[in-house]
Image (tube, rainbow, N blue to C red):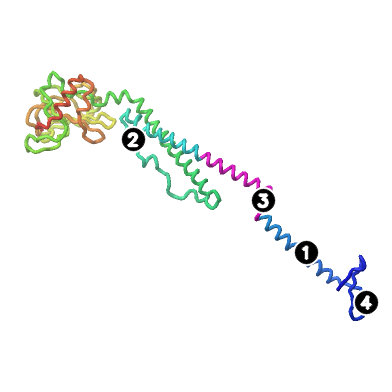
């Protein structure tokens, strides 16, 4: 057992000689002891660092965590504001489709157009791999979605502005009067819908309205437009005229005895374009009149609001509803 008897030298008890003998350490012994001391120090320092790293935050880490929490709260607030913006945009879109465009006789924008370019290739891949990836990606996607819809909505309002500027022209172009004057009109013999065919005696869709009038009675353009076709025929509609009014509207005037217009001619509402007859597949002098919107035949009864009194219009609706026999 070693015993320190001096501050500068170390001694060891020798049981054989029963004396304390001075220990003379070599350099390598000193070096060995130093290395052991360093290794032990490094070991305990490593344990201390591991414990501190896993269980205690450094001031810098505390600051960073505080900033991350603050950013997370800001993202949540931003998403709440985005939800409000989306709600407002949805209301604007609804007004655009169901109010503004209805007023100006325009079709609503389809969902395919409004959502064009949304989705597809994973353009947010660079945002993957982070702690708050889902939150950041969701916010980015919502922002992109809103931006694209705003572009579509902006273009839509540009169209609505143009429609508003052309409203006067639109009102002048829409078919809005009877094609036969009341003084020449004997009766409105057949309306829009399934009627008994005068020749085949079977129920067949009648795609217009028949106005009985004497041969030679003037036929009037019901709206401003361009004469698209003037056709002479002994079949079907017989001698007929089609006017293109623009804005998706066309009108057809059939079974005429003669014409008072030519293809390409510009006409205004009330201009004489032809005369009543009984040409083609017709059983008596009358005018067969049709209104087309976007290439679809629609009931002309809805387009006599300019020259009929409420009582006359009600009577016209009553007559057109009768499932009687048509003249063609």
For the point 15% across and 28% down, the residue is 320
Cα–Cα span, label 3 and label 1: 27 Å
Cα–Cα span, label 4 and label 2: 114 Å
For the point 50% across and 51% down, the residue is 125
Q: Label 4: which residue? A: 19
Q: Range of the magenta residues? A: 54-78
Residue 303 found in image quarter: top left
Q: Label 2: which residue? A: 108
Which quadrant would the N terminus be assigned to in this image?
Answer: bottom right
In terms of depth relative to the viewer, which is nearer, 208 or 28? Answer: 28
Q: Earlier in the sequence, mark 4 or mark 3?
A: 4
| Nearer to us: label 1 or label 4 | 4
Q: Earlier in the sequence, mark 4 or mark 2?
A: 4
Residue 263 is situated, as x and y percent measured from the top left of the image, at 21, 29
Residues packed near mark 1 inside 10 Å, few (<14), some (14 to 19) or many (20 plus):
few
| Nearer to us: label 3 or label 1 | 3
* Local secondary structure at mark 2: loop
Residues packed near mark 2 inside 10 Å, few (<14), some (14 to 19) or many (20 plus):
some
Q: Residue furthest toward the bottom?
A: 16
Q: Label 1: which residue? A: 38
Residue 233 found in image quarter: top left
Left-right relation of 325 to 61: left
Q: Earlier in the sequence, mark 2 or mark 1?
A: 1
Tell whether label 2 touches label 3 (CB within 8 Å): no
Cα–Cα span, label 4 and label 3: 57 Å
* Local secondary structure at mark 3: loop
Cα–Cα span, label 3 and label 2: 58 Å
Q: Label 3: which residue? A: 57
| Nearer to us: label 2 or label 1 | 1
Residues packed near mark 3 inside 10 Å, few (<14), some (14 to 19) or many (20 plus):
few
């Amino acid at each position: 057992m070693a015993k320190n008897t001096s501050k500068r030298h170390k001694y060891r008890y020798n049981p054989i000689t029963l004396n304390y003998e001075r220990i003379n350490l070599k350099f390598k012994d000193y070096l060995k002891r130093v290395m052991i001391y360093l290794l032990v120090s490094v070991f305990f320092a490593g344990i201390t660092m591991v414990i501190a790293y896993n269980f205690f935050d450094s001031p810098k880490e505390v600051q960073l965590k505080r900033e991350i929490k603050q950013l997370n709260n800001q993202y949540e607030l931003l998403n709440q504001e985005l939800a409000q913006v989306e709600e407002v945009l949805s209301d604007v879109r609804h007004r655009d489709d169901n109010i503004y465009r209805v007023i100006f006789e325009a079709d609503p924008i389809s969902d395919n157009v409004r959502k064009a370019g949304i989705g597809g290739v994973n353009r947010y891949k660079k945002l993957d791999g982070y702690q708050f990836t889902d939150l950041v990606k969701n916010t980015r996607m919502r922002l992109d979605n809103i931006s694209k819809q705003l572009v579509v909505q902006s273009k839509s309002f540009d169209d609505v502005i143009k429609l508003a500027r052309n409203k006067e022209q639109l009102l002048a172009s829409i078919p809005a009067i009877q094609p036969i004057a009341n003084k020449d009109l004997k009766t409105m013999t057949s309306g829009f819908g399934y009627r008994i065919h005068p020749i085949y005696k079977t129920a067949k869709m009648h795609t217009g309205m028949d106005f009985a009038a004497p041969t030679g009675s003037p036929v009037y353009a019901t709206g401003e437009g361009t004469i698209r076709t003037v056709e002479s025929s002994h079949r079907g509609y017989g001698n007929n005229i089609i006017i293109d009014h623009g804005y998706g509207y066309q009108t057809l005037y059939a079974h005429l005895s003669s014409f008072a217009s030519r293809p390409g001619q510009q006409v205004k509402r009330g201009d004489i374009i032809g005369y009543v007859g009984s040409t083609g597949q017709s059983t008596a002098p009358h005018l067969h009149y049709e209104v087309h919107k976007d290439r679809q035949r629609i009931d002309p009864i809805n387009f006599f609001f300019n020259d009929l009194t409420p009582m006359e219009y009600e009577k016209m609706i009553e007559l057109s509803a009768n499932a009687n026999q048509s003249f063609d």
